[in-house]
Amino acid sequence: MHGVTVAGRLAGPVDLILDGGDRLLVTGGNGAGKSTLLAVLSGALRPTEGYVRTAEGARVVRVCQETAALDPALTAREVHARHVGRLVARGVLRDSEAAPLGGLGLLSSEAMRVPVGRMSQGQRRRLDLALALAGRPGLLLLDEPTNHLSSLLVDELTEAIRGTTAAVVATHDRQLLRDLADWPRLELRQAR
């Protein structure tokens, strides 16, 4: 990322280089552009100025603050299977490369059979994480990942994040900031 700004949303210019295995904690107050930065890094949003280059074949996945819009009648297993099917159809990965839903430890076998419309917010959040991990991303972009999670799950998520090979976490959650205090930090400031 070089010289990136997004008018009215991300003051800049922001320069950032992420290599395999890098970790980064993005901080700043509400409205400072944390979510915008992750959207630009993922390719979901084009910067007003500057550019982003991603290595060919790199798998970059973003988990947004709010849970994804999913068919409420489908079970977590069905949602995961369809998601993997789309990734395979687009050539993102081979079916054998996909991370199995049950192997991630995010949902119990009972929760995997519950229709999405009847899941708790915490279960939906864990399903979003499972869908992101299904494609075995090389870079995981987590936007306020502790939203809708119990304190026990926040601890488990923090442990998992610390074990990832490459992640960018945007948060203002005090506990997560303390738990990831040894990570390199990019502090964003609101545009004036």
Image: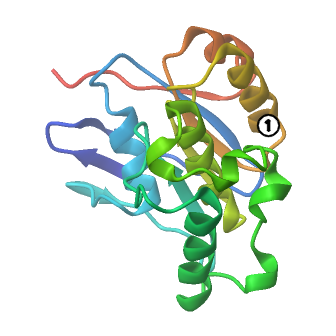
The part of the image, by quadrant, that contains residue 102 is bottom right
Q: Secondary structure at mark 1?
A: helix
Q: Indicate left or right for 177 with 164 as reference.
A: left
Quadrant where the C terminus sits is top left
The part of the image, by quadrant, that contains residue 80 is bottom right
Quadrant where the N terminus sits is bottom left
Q: Residue at x 33, y 21 (%)?
A: 189
**x and y, in percent, of residue 174 in the image:** 57, 9
**x and y, in percent, of residue 126 in the image:** 62, 42
Residue type, mark 1 in image: Ala
Q: Residue at x 50, y 51 (%)?
A: 116
Q: Which residue is mark 1?
A: 160
> Relative to residue 88, is residue 20 depicted above or below?
above
Looking at the rendered structure, the number of numbered marks drawn on it comes to: 1
Who is closer to the viewer here, 61 or 4? 61
Who is closer to the viewer here, 59 or 67? 67
The part of the image, by quadrant, that contains residue 176 is top right
**x and y, in percent, of residue 135 in the image:** 67, 68
> Relative to residue 158, is residue 92 depicted above or below?
below
Q: Residue at x 63, y 36 (%)?
A: 24
Who is closer to the viewer here, 91 or 107? 107
Q: Is residue 14 visible?
A: no
**x and y, in percent, of residue 5 in the image:** 26, 45
